[in-house]
Image (cartoon, rainbow, N blue to C red):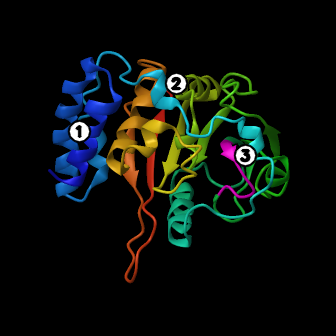
Amino acid sequence: MNAVGRRVALLGSGLLGASAMQLAGRRGTAASAASAKTDIEKVLDDPRWPEQFPFRPENFARYDETPDTYFYSQPRFVTHIDDGAIKALTKFYGEVFPPSGTQTAAVLDICSSWVSHYPEGYKAGRVAGLGMNESELARNVQLTEFSVKDLNVDPRLPYEDNSFDVITNCVSVDYLNKPLEIFREMHRVLKPGGTAYMSFSNRCFPTKAIALWTATGDADHVWIVGSYFHYSVPGGWSEPSCKDITPKAMFGRTDPMYVVMATKKA
């Protein structure tokens, strides 16, 4: 059994309900094929979603359940992925964002920080950030506004319906313990035709990431994030897809980087 197959087996036997175990085995076929092609994007080509959301409440527990406000009380002016991954993500954003300077465009960065990795000088009529540390958010020069909120306590987004063209989340989806509620909120505040981009790598604060994430690997993470779109607003999102933007390093290694995305249907 290859590495992806072992992760699929772990999902099926240790984390999912019995009714989802057969599904995990079936999706293993797609995941293993993707691995054989070194193309993780194909994990969502045939995801074989079960009828019901397959994860249990305990899958969203964290080793450290103290309030996140304690953990994030001190600013961290550091980056959480390497330079190659940052460059790849910035390039991707430049390809999918509304053109810089579009005054009618509105972008929201959730779980934001002191840097959003948007293209340098990117401007829109509204660039909102929502995160956990006020000092970090105040230093983010690309934001036109920011709010401080713990979405793991209250997943409601403090924005009007149909407000944003784009929502981003960079290397933080693994910390969300109420993902379906948050993805419903993202759907609510997106304009029809707006897209949410969830990017992640293989780094995290393991004590704060959900159990489901720390027990599984990259291919499963793609499937898990895709499932958040699929089950949060049934029929309300386009089918989620994955883009593997991992930079091709000529020497040494670089952090892998993936984006799972879906668009709010009109």
Instruction: Give the residue at x 80% y 58%.
Output: 141
| Helix, strand or loop at mark 3 | helix
Between circles 3 and 2, the one closer to the viewer is: 3
Is 251 a magenta residue?
Answer: no
**Which quadrant holds residue 49?**
top left
Task: Count residues near mark 2 (Cα–Cα under 10 Å), then give few for <14, some for 14-19, many for 20+.
Answer: some
Q: Secondary structure at mark 1?
A: helix
C-beta proximity under 8 Å, tags 3 and 2: no
- Label located before the other in sequence (3 or 2): 3
Whether residue 45 is visible here, answered yes or no, is no
Q: Residue at x 52, y 24 (%)?
A: 180
Image location (x, y in percent) of residue 224: 40, 36
Q: Amino acid at mark 2?
A: Leu
Marks 3 and 1, the one that precedes in the sequence = 1
Q: Position of residue 48 (x, y in %)?
A: 24, 28
Considering depth in this image, is 111 or 166 the residue closer to the camera? 111
36 lies left or right of 108:
left
Which class describes the residues within 10 Å of circle 1: few (<14), some (14-19), or many (20+)? some
Disc marking residue 71: 3
Res. 229 visible in picture: yes
Of residues 246 and 70, the one nearer the viewer is 70
Query: Badge 2 is on which residue?
Result: 180
Residue under the point 22% across and 35% down: 27
Residue at (73% x, 23% y) in the render: 160
The residue tagged 1 is: 9
Q: CA distance from mark 1 to mark 2?
A: 24 Å
Give the total number of marks visible in the rendering.
3
Point out the tag, 1 or 2, that comes first from the N-terminus. Answer: 1
Q: Would you place residue 91 above or below residue 204 in this image?
A: below
Q: Is residue 156 left or right of residue 181?
A: right
Amino acid type, label 1: Ala
Q: Is residue 235 left or right of residue 41?
A: right
